[in-house]
Image (cartoon, grey):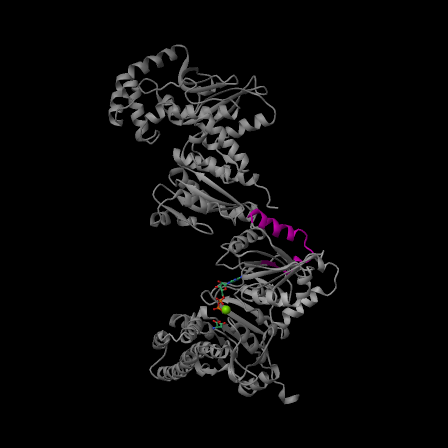
Amino acid sequence: MGDRFVAVEPWKFHKFGGSSLFDAACFRRVADIIKSQPAARVGVVVSAMGGMTDRLLQLTELAAKDDKQYEQELKALGDRYAAAADELLSTESRPGVIDQWLQDARDLTDMLRAVADTQTATQRSRDQVAGFGELWSTRLLAAYLGETLPDQRGGRWLDARDILTVRHGELGPAVNWPVSQRKFDQQIGNFEQGVVVITGFIAVDEEDCHTTLGRNGSDFSAAIFAALAGADELTIWTDVDGVMSGDPNRVPDAQIIDALSYNEALELAYFGAKVIHPQTLGPAIDNDITVLIRNTFAPDRPGSRIGATIEVGNSVKGITAIDRMALVNLEGTGMIGVPGTADRLFAALKQARVSVTLISQASSEHSICIAVPEELADKAKRVISGAFAEELKDGQIQRVDVTRAQSIIAVVGDNMAGAVGLAARFFSSLARAGINIRAIAQGSSERNISAVIDASESTRALRAVHSGFYLSTKTISIGVIGPGLVGGALLDQLHKQSEVLRDEFQIDLRVRAIGRSKAMIMDDRRIELADWRAAMEKSEQAFDLQKFVEHVDADHLPHAAIIDCTSNNEVAGQYANWLERGIHVVTPNKKAFSGSLAAYQALRVAARRGSAHYMYETTVGAALPIISTIRDLINTGDKVRSITGIFSGTLAYLFNVYDATKPFSEIVREAKSSGYTEPDPRDDLSGMDVARKLTILARELGLSLDIGGFPVQNLIPEKLRDAPVDEFLSGLADYDTEMESQFIAAREQGKVLRYVATLNDKGEAAVGLQMIPTDNPLANINLTDNIVQFVTDRYAQNPLVVQGPGAGPEVTAGGVFGDLLRLAAYLKGND
Ligand code: ADP
Ligand code: ASP
Ligand code: MG
């Protein structure tokens, strides 16, 4: 070996897909990536500019119909190309590239004319036409690199057809390696330094005729050239961050897979993950070439690494779907125990060149079912019917059925082998989404499980299965209605906490919709809560409750919850519907739970039917643990004998402050201007708010209480009930002496005035002003505190007291958040 031993660093190969080459800006981006490569020898395999191959193929379709439109279309392609060349190239190199294009356009026109004359587009002419896209993109890139790379490192251009020689076999194009290698070595065997730009997709066959490697075939070209060059690494640059756990266009939650084995990538590609052409892996495996999938538009991200090693970790790597399939079913008792039926079937199909994507045979051998591409279904049926003509005639085989519009859903992963429960999870995810499975197959390597389903359900199925494997069972799709004071504070709190909850507790709270009376925003994954206010302001989407609910109740997420932060009756009226369809409801809105008893009972029934929860701790005393305390007491066997409390922060404040030194009306006015009352203080003074809260508590005790069924003292003088707010405020002064005399009467007995709600286990309830001894806890609360005393069998002598701030956006939002977390804790696993 002696003097031949030169330690040359291996080639590095890069492939840029059409999605990375849309316009001049894209070419610049690509060139920047190439420039930053440190390797001495860089091979760059390039697809046609995005969409170009499709457009070229359309030209042949038009020509085949003798539609002259193809001439204009071709001109449009030229314009697009010239525009990119104008932007990228100098006046020196531009004419050469454009001349080449014009020459090609003339050749192309001749070919299209020939197609038009015969009105048929043969595979060969389609291949020839389609191949121009790669010639054009590579010439442009090579010329641009020639001008921009230093030291003439760039600019070398290679037409793959001078090297890559293939034979079209049953499994697609097969490389003639010895011939291709010889030609490669002749052309660039001794290339030492720089960048070579090579056309993807195109090749020649063994008769030296132009051909292609099939749609999406540039990935395969790149792997072949990397192998020919002895490269140890191939980076496939595309428009996503890597191989993802599901097609990102269809599965909003798809995640980047950091590392995959060759086999995993192969299975995913085979089952339809478009990001990589399935044949790409062959040359990579044989030559131990590491394949990286990276994003041209985000070159700082690491992407996915595909190599020989099996990673430990997630047993399921990805979920994919192949659409446009048909199921062919061969059924008959005559097949039972007859050896060789399957062999005959496959031999016949093989001969007719029908490739079978999935096979499923019942162990009784009563039926065999195969999935084939839909366009081959009729052929498959014909072939099978021919091969089993005898049996069909004799009735041993009853029929050959074809079901069209099917899809195959597959889950893929090396570590699936031996992992228990994966199939169960796969099928239960489909079942939960109500998707019917028509056939099932598991690869003997246990690296994949696949199921055939109706094509119309394939996206839903992908999402459901993906969430079954990838999402925490405590993932909740959330819609917030009413992002006002409380709702807004809640969204901010969720924003702050959600990462910790996700990372540490696997509680994934995804706010996916926010709506208020006029507008709404929705997001498939999750709304970026850092700037929800701005997004809300910008939103041009009118609020539509039905759309909102449909969006929140997404099939692909395990749970859905609506948080109603309005005090709206109409929204509250929807709870029963939501609960019935399984959507959980969390709310500080009192309306539904204190409405008519019949409506309240309907809510309970709906929740039971839909297995949904409704959480409303904050309807009484904001975040104070009042409802949960009652539940705990009851559930642990205690008996609540009575409840006494102050449930209105506003009324608590008014009577805490009022000491007859100032008129009561003055105190009301001050409280209003400091924001302690509702905009119309009568909403507080009417006592209705307290009555609603007491009703909710009574129902918690199992009592059939209804608003109207117990006395509620209204503190608004009758005459002022319908007056405008201002008139009410000034008119209230006329009643100051009345209040004062009540206060003095109380003081004389050593008591104070408090607006109190009471309830006992016989269902007796009342709401109104009471004189309370000054040593009673109810007489000793801070400003707007709420307080509740529970007398129970266990707390008979000394009541249980819950006290603290019972209003305010932050604490109420905190309470709603707490309810949401309790909800998450209730939610069981998926399977
Ligand atoms: P290129 O033009 O670079 O070859 P393709 O459009 O052929 O790009 O492939 C990339 C596209 O593949 C992505 O934009 C994405 O929409 C789609 N895709 C489908 N399944 C997957 C998957 N599992 N992971 C990543 N991308 C996928
Ligand atoms: N340009 C070809 C196609 O669109 C090949 C490729 O992009 O991989 O199919
Ligand atoms: Mg591609």
Left/right placement of residue 486 relative to residue 459 reads: left
Picture coordinates of residue 559, whole percent (x, y): 52, 44
Residue range of the region highlighted in magenta in the rendering: 409-434
Quarter of the picture containing the N terminus is bottom right
Q: Nearer the viewer, residue 641 or 108?
A: 108
Picture coordinates of residue 585, whole percent (x, y): 48, 37
Q: Is residue 48 visible?
A: yes
Q: Is residue 515 magenta?
A: no
Count of picture labels: 0
Q: Nearer the viewer, residue 825 or 75?
A: 75
Q: Quadrant of residue 382?
A: bottom right
Left/right placement of residue 168 relative to residue 759 reads: right
Q: Quadrant of residue 724?
A: top left
Vertical placement of residue 788 versus 160, above or below: above
At 35% from the left edge and 29% from the top edge, which residue is drawn?
676
Picture coordinates of residue 647, whole percent (x, y): 43, 25
Q: Is residue 411 magenta?
A: yes
Vertical placement of residue 755 versus 470, above or below: above
Q: Nearer the viewer, residue 662 or 226?
A: 226
Picture coordinates of residue 5, whole percent (x, y): 63, 85
Q: Is residue 80 visible?
A: no
At 39% from the left edge and 71% from the top edge, which residue is drawn?
23
At 62% from the left edge and 72% from the top edge, which residue is drawn?
285
Q: Quadrant of residue 670?
A: top left
Left/right placement of residue 317 relative to residue 766 reads: right
Vertical placement of residue 278 versus 534, above or below: below
Vertical placement of residue 762 versus 673, above or below: above
